[in-house]
Amino acid sequence: MINIQNLSKVFSTEEIETKALNEVSLQIKQGEFVTIMGASGCGKSTLLNIVGLLDNVSSGSYKLLDREINGLSESEKSKIRKENIGFVFQNFNLIDELSVYDNIELPLIYNNVPSSERKKKVEAIAERLAISHRLRHYPQQLSGGQQQRVAVARALINDPKIILADEPTGNLDSKNGNEVMELLTDLHANGATILMVTHSDYDASFSQKTIFMKDGMVLTEKHNSRNVDVLVSNS
């Protein structure tokens, strides 16, 4: 699903050139749940932004669904992003002036989905994530965990092929954070492909594989025993 080869990203100013990613290569298969970890500034968020088509590469190859992304126009990348990728952010990124219903519906409007179909899809995803009773509330009226559920609902509303999660529990207490991780685990168990950036060893343990980065490079990869235990217990 994701195939990255010798990918580099350089940020340049008049005075300095910073290599945020240095010859990174990795593959993520359909249905995998993968975590990227590393100290602040190691390049993990830059890599996530490139995977999410929010930033451009300086050199190397990035193929999404067997299509080379490097060199595509912004409109082409925008179309691919809207059709294939859902984002979950640390800060939720909900619009305070819009109700929960309207926040979830927004990506459908961008994709020109008819009104009647939008209503069905919003109600269905809200029920799936146990927030149907909150659809007429506003983000400020919700707990952090509920806001992140709304953000996940918005990420899933267009049935994306991949979910990108950037520190999804970073602003949550342990109880709400655990609920979000269990939600991501359930999505993965139902076939979702997930790439998550986190500083938390605990959150990373929910994934199948952890990629460790340092100074813009991939250091090591490891498979997580906790996820194996979960899969065995659910089988």
Image: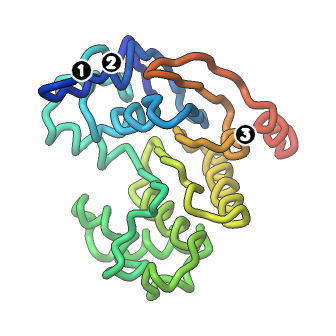
Any mark on residue 8, and which?
A: 2
- Residue at mark 1: 58
Q: Earlier in the sequence, mark 3 or mark 2?
A: 2
Instruction: Identify which residue is drawn at 46% across, 44% down.
Output: 164
Q: Nearer the viewer, mark 3 or mark 2?
A: 2
Residues at circles 1 and 2 in contact by the CB criterion of under 8 Å: yes
Q: Give the amino acid type for the residue marked by disc 1 in the picture.
A: Ser
The one of 78 and 200 positioned closer to us in this rendering: 200
Name the secondary structure under disc 3. Answer: loop
Q: Earlier in the sequence, mark 1 or mark 2?
A: 2
Instruction: Identify which residue is drawn at 44% across, 88% down.
Output: 136
Q: Give the amino acid type for the residue marked by disc 2 in the picture.
A: Ser
- Residue at mark 3: 205
Residue 101 in which image quadrant = bottom left
111 displayed left or right of 141: left
Q: Earlier in the sequence, mark 1 or mark 3?
A: 1
Residue 199 in which image quadrant = top right
Against 214, is 147 above or below?
below
